[in-house]
Amino acid sequence: MSHLLLVEDDALLQDGLRAQLVSAGHTAEAASNGQQALTFLETQRFDGVVLDLGLPPVHGIDMDGIHVLRTIRQRLSNLPVLILTARDDIDDRVQGLNAGADDYLTKPFDMAELLARLAAMLRRSRMPAFDSAPESEHSFKHRLRIDPDLPLAWLGEEAMDLTQREWSLLKLLLDHIGQVVSREDVFSVWQTQAPEVGASGSNALEVYIHRLRRKLHDSGLNIRNIRGLGYMLELHHP
């Protein structure tokens, strides 16, 4: 059983979600705006947060879900957060993930999927790797180094065997550690950094991602596939 914070301003949806969370075996507190959510987080310990992005202002001050999420990451860096959003634009979802969300779900959603995603997120949060402080960007770049101009890279002191396109893709991911890199971003960089290799489709991109994953094996780094959005370079959590 987990103690959860549900942040949702729609009273009807809030009541329904809270009832479903309790029915699934959790305990849950509910907040209707960002200020209430932050007050709960200051006074209680939670195992996870279900956070609506479209929260109303509080006394004329913008306290939307992104603001709450960034505050959570400043104060409770390892607290799992699943965001709910009616915004189905890719940029909005990328913004939520880059602000620190562990997962997202767009409205309207299926309750069974929400409960399954929440359960998976809570399981991941209990893994030993989450008990330690996250590795800094400096540590990432100390472990993996890339020449900014030439197709060369090193894992520790060992040179990596990379093609021009693999180097270009890996450099883009490293330059955006912990952030989502879209497929469109990759194709754009391939055209500017490696125009001689030409354009590439999604299937070819998956091949290069697979190759890089193999070359990063045992490095402690992983290229995570963010469904429908793109890729993220991050520490591998076993």
Image (cartoon, rainbow, N blue to C red):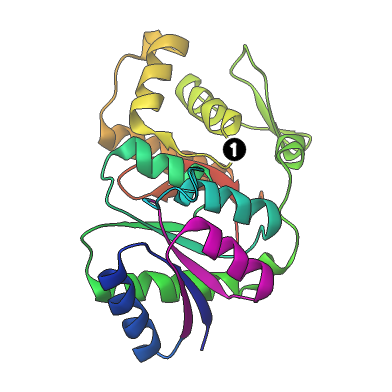
User: The C terminus lies in which quarter of the figure?
Assistant: bottom right
Q: Residue at x 28, y 78 (%)?
A: 16
Helix, strand or loop at label 1? It is loop
Closest to the observer: 108 or 33? 33
Q: Which residue is mark 1?
A: 177
- Residue 20 picture location, percent across and down: 32, 83
Q: How many marks?
A: 1
Image quadrant in which you'd find residue 41: bottom right
Say above or below: 232 vs 141.
below
Q: Is residue 129 above or below residue 228?
A: below
Asked which quadrant contains residue 95, the reply is top left
Please state the horizontal and vertical placement of residue 204, each as a whole percent of the image.
30, 33
Residue at figure coordinates x 26%, y 76% from the top left: 112
Q: Residues within 10 Å of mark 1 (few under 14, many from 20)?
A: some
Asked whether residue 238 appears in the rendered view, the answer is: no
Residue 143 covered by magenta stretch: no
Q: Nearer the viewer, residue 158 or 221?
A: 221
Horizontal relation, residue 9 to residue 137: left or right: left
Q: Please state which of residues 21 and 29 is positioned toward the viewer in this rendering.
A: 29
Q: Does the magenta run of residues contain 49? A: yes
Residue 116 visible (yes or no): yes
> Residue at coordinates 70% horizontally, 40% vertically from top-left?
140
Kind of residue at disc 1: Ile
Q: Is residue 160 above or below residue 193?
A: below
Q: Which residues are magenta?
A: 27-53
- At which x and y percent is residue 46? 59, 75
Give the left or right position of residue 67, taking residue 143 as reference: left
- Measured as percent of width and height from the top left, residue 53 is found at 40, 52
